Image (cartoon, grey):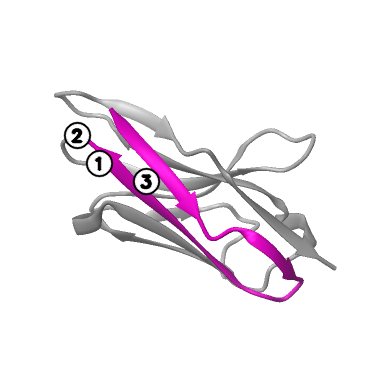
Amino acid sequence: QVQLVESGGGLVQAGGSLRLSCAASGSFFSINAMGWYRQAPGKQRELVATNTCGGRTNYADSVKGRFTLSRDNARNMVYLQMNSLKPDDTAVYYCNAARTSLPRPFDVWGQGTLVTVSS
């Protein structure tokens, strides 16, 4: 069983910064991919940034140059540094972790953390 716990959301003014953290715990082998998604009110969940272990990080066009994903594989953590925040970034941000290889593959989500950007 794999659990993800996010932290770091909150209220910030436009132009400000926040750093989200996500910690994976439980019994598992390695994690292949970790990333962040978000869901704004009335909209579908969308990708923000994902990283495949040993590979490149993919960012949504809307956050390129402003957001940075980083991983601490030894601690099974992923972070999202968000700079130059805009009101359009307001959403619930979800951490995702996936293992696509055997044994014991998984694809899990955190509970979400709310980010509110005021204008």
119 sits left or right of 98 in the view: right
**Cα distance in 3D space between marks 1 and 3:** 7 Å
Residue that numbered label 1 is attached to: 31
- What's the CA distance linking mark 2 and mark 3? 14 Å
Q: Nearer the viewer, mark 1 or mark 2?
A: 2
Classified by dominant secondary structure, the portion drawn in magenta counts as strand
Check residue 28 in the rendering and tell me which mark sits there, or answer none.
Answer: 2
Mark 1 and mark 2: span between their CA atoms? 8 Å
* Mark 3: secondary structure: strand
**Left or right for 40, reference 8:** right
In the foreground, 65 or 117 = 117
Q: Secondary structure at mark 2?
A: loop
**Measured from the top left, where is residue 66 in percent x and y?**
59, 69
Contact, CB < 8 Å: mark 1 with mark 2?
yes
Does 97 appear above or below 63? above
Magenta-drawn stretch contains 12 = yes
Q: Label 2 sits on what residue type?
A: Phe
Q: Earlier in the sequence, mark 2 or mark 3?
A: 2
Looking at the rendered structure, the secondary structure element under dot 1 is loop
Amino acid carrying mark 1 in the image: Ile
The magenta-colored residue range is 1-26
Q: Are marks 1 and 3 in contact (CB under 8 Å)?
A: yes
Q: Which residue is mark 3?
A: 34
- x and y percent of residue 74 in the render? 19, 57
Q: Is residue 8 above or below residue 113?
A: below
For the C terminus, which image quadrant? bottom right
Q: Nearer the viewer, mark 2 or mark 3?
A: 2
Q: Quadrant of residue 99?
A: top left
